[in-house]
Image (cartoon, rainbow, N blue to C red):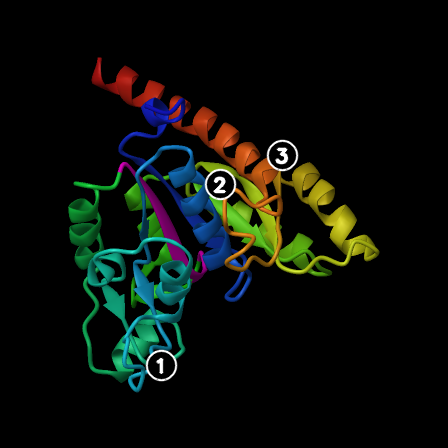
């Protein structure tokens, strides 16, 4: 058993972001690879995906395809229970297709996956205030799942405002935040990229910046590669371990 297995057993992490296209899928895949290389049976869940190409013979949502291209992905239907064609918020996309969205399907799939997954990496759709139904947002799903959140943001101008708004929304809902990471190409000569994390930490009452996840391909997503960002991985898992231990202590107190 790995050193992390005891703390991470039957737990998970919800990977959310400040917007769509900020790198949630790359970060989720990176975490899956690192966790599995650390001896943890980590599994992926994408509760809802939109923009599905009906002409694609594989029929996999783009996010699931990226995960499948870089690590093992079984039971794809369970791993993305809500899928829609239009590249819109799930509520709008489902309405255009005449589909009624039942969030219960997400929990049914998650419960089945947890029979084999030791740890769940759950990737949200867009940002935290994206609607799944007319009265149910991604942040509502996060609250009901009860997992710590990792926020993914851009390493560029504007990210202070976007990230602080996201963190504030999560804190107001009493959702535990493990920290935030930047993802994508970072111009280190850009003052916005180098100074934004410090400002976000300062104005979020110390929610920690856990590092940068660069663009990753098959070679750099190999855990044996010198380009695999292990330093960021260890920061995330260290902070997550403390978050999960805190949650476990609270649960034990409530049950005593």
Q: Quadrant of the N terminus?
A: top left
Name the foreground residue: 29 vs 247. 29
Report how far apart the C-alphas of labels 1 and 2 lie in the structure.
31 Å
Q: Quadrant of residue 123?
A: bottom left
What stretch of residues is rendered in magenta?
Answer: 118-128
- The residue lying at 20 percent from left, 41 percent from top is 116
Q: Which residue is mark 3?
A: 205
Report how far apart the C-alphas of labels 2 and 3 lie in the structure.
11 Å
Report how far apart the C-alphas of labels 3 and 1 lie in the structure.
38 Å
- The residue lying at 20 percent from left, 51 percent from top is 107
Find out whether residue 125 is within the magenta segment.
yes
Q: As drawn, is 96 to the left or to the right of 197?
A: left
Residue 202 pos. (x, y %): 70, 37
On screen, residue 98 above or below 4? below
| Mark whose residue sits in front, 3 or 1 | 1
Where disc 1 sits, the SS reads loop
Structural crowding at the residue carrying mark 3, measured as other residues with C-alpha within 10 Å and reported as few (<14), some (14–19) or many (≥20): few
Instruction: Tell me which secondary structure the magenta stretch mostly adopts.
Output: strand
Name the foreground residue: 237 vs 179. 237
Q: Which residue is mark 1?
A: 86
- The residue lying at 35 percent from left, 81 percent from top is 86
Name the foreground residue: 172 vs 248. 248
Q: As drawn, is 231 to the left or to the right of 193?
A: left
Q: Which residue is mark 2?
A: 171
């Amino acid at each position: 058993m790995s050193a992390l297995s005891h703390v991470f057993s039957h737990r998970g992490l919800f990977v959310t972001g400040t917007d769509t296209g900020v790198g949630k899928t790359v970060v989720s895949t990176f975490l899956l690879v690192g966790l599995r290389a650390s001896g943890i049976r980590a599994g992926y869940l994408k509760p809802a995906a939109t923009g599905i190409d009906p002409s694609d013979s594989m029929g996999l949502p783009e996010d699931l395809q990226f995960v499948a291209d870089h690590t093992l992905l079984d039971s794809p239907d369970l791993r993305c229970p809500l899928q829609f064609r239009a590249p819109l918020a799930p509520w709008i996309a489902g309405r255009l297709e005449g589909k009624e969205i039942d969030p219960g399907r997400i929990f049914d799939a998650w419960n089945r996956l947890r029979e084999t997954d030791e740890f769940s990496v759950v990737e949200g759709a867009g940002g935290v205030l994206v609607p799944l139904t007319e009265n149910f947002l991604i942040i509502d799903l996060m609250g009901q799942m009860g997992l710590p959140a990792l926020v993914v943001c851009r390493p560029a101008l504007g990210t202070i405002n976007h990230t602080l708004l996201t963190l504030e929304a999560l804190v107001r809902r009493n959702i535990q935040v493990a920290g935030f990471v930047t993802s994508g190409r970072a111009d280190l000569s850009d003052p916005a990229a180098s100074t934004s994390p410090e400002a976000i930490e300062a104005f979020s009452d110390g929610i920690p910046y856990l590092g940068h996840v660069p663009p990753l391909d098959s070679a750099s997503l190999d855990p044996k590669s010198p380009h695999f960002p292990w330093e960021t991985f260890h920061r995330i898992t260290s902070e997550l371990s403390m978050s999960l231990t805190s949650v476990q202590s609270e649960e034990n107190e409530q049950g005593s």
